[in-house]
Amino acid sequence: MNVSDWLKFSTIDRLRSSRSEFIQLAILLLVLGFSGRAADGPAKDNAPKLIAPAVSIGTGLLLEPALTLPEFPREKFEAAMATVGAEKIHRPWTNAVVPLPPHPRAEVKGLTHDEAKAYMMEAKRRFDAGEAVPLSDVGLISTQEDVIRKPMLNHIAAFSNEVARVYLLVQKTYSDNGWSYFSIVQDLTVSPPIDYFAEIRKTGPHFEATSCYKCHASGPLAIHPAREDLVLDAPLAAAIGQFIADQPRSVLFVPEDSPKPPTGEPLTLKFCARCHAEDGDRDRLFQVQSHPIRVLVDFGYMPPNRRLKPEEIAQLKAWLEKKP
Ligand code: HEC
Ligand code: HEC
């Protein structure tokens, strides 16, 4: 290569490289510009991934075939949801979790039962006044319930301040007339946090454990719409799902008049008990949780990051079929 060739070559090369630097700079500016805008925009711009649709992966663990809910075309679902009061649901939002004012008692260590109930009533009041941001869906586990096997229509709203996370569930089956109210309050002022579960009756919240423990051993549950189109605001469902997933490990408050049901044997299979253990991310699982276990595994939600191998499914099946 002679000198002039070398010069020519290197000039073109330099030109090329300066052009690529220019392109890189332009991309950088573009990215900065966009992220700058995203930071000013609504929280939705950093939206979490949408919840994967519930599709059976065919483990053979379900006791009955998966519900396909043919009685629910989208329009009928929307109409049924709106009977709660169309103005209360499917509302525009920027923050999926409604902020509550600071707790009235400073430096609180342990909410009183009355305070927990007051948070539940406040959540209901806001929902009734159209001041909540509820997601509306037909939930997966209830529709698979081996006993009821009826689709449950759910409106779920989340609220929080420094001391508490508050959840409201407004629910009915398709054939029920009225809507029922349930709530979970997580007291964050103690370690581990305490979860209060209640049905909100005409007379006010009534704490319960017996009827909730079976599905909710470790507090609030991930949102899982039973069918992709049976949810009114999928990005909101994902955002509330994210808030629930970020919750601290908590313990269930068990009132005297509503004890834990008999649990049966613990699930000790390593591929579950790695996380579901005394000192794990979630509480231990027992035979009483067979139904949610069958459903969440068959729909590929559990374990969270991989599929079970056939021999693992067989081990789980054998455990599920043991008599309590
Ligand atoms: C058959 C299982 C089952 C039982 C029993 C049950 N729940 Fe749930 N619950 C669910 C499922 C599944 C969801 C999420 C539903 C969805 O995706 O819409 C849920 C959601 C909730 C939520 C909204 C926050 C969250 O966890 O996602 C509240 C509040 C709630 N339940 C309260 C209660 C209370 C109080 C009881 C007892 C009186 C109870 N539940 C009993 C299955 C159950
Ligand atoms: C890597 C950790 C991990 C593994 C392994 C795992 N789970 Fe989970 N599991 C979670 C988390 C986190 C949640 C709560 C969030 C959710 O529901 O997505 C959960 C929720 C559940 C629930 C709902 C009740 C609850 O505790 O909230 C059931 C039932 C469940 N898992 C069953 C199983 C079974 C059965 C296996 C084994 C086949 C399994 N899980 C393996 C982390 C795990």
Image (cartoon, rainbow, N blue to C red):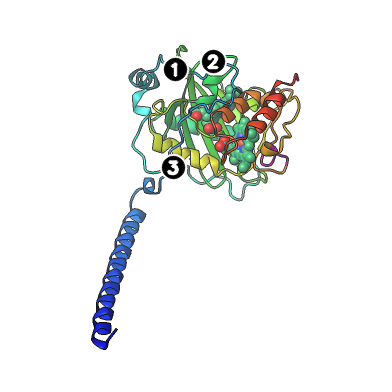
Q: Which mark is residue 149?
A: 2
Q: Is residue 146 above or below residue 108?
A: above
Q: Is residue 41 above or below residue 281?
A: below
Query: Residue 173 or 74: which is nearer the viewer?
Result: 74
Among the two numbered marks 2 and 1 on one chain, the one whose residue lies closer to the N terminus: 1
Left or right of 222 in this view: 210: right
Please give the residue where the numbered disc 1 appears in the rendered image.
69
Q: Point out residue 276 in the picture as x, y percentages from the top left corner.
A: 67, 38
The span shown in magenta is: 273-278
Callout 1 amino acid? Leu
Q: Point out residue 36 in the picture as x, y percentages from the top left corner.
A: 33, 59
Callout 2 amino acid? Arg
Quarter that holds the N terminus: bottom left
Query: Residue 228 or 137: which is nearer the viewer?
Result: 228
Q: Point out residue 272 in the picture as x, y percentages from the top left corner.
A: 67, 37
* Residue at the (41%, 43%) spot, across then down: 95
Q: Which mark is residue 49?
A: 3
Callout 3 amino acid? Lys
Secondary-structure class at tag 1: loop
Q: CA distance from mark 2 to mark 3?
A: 29 Å
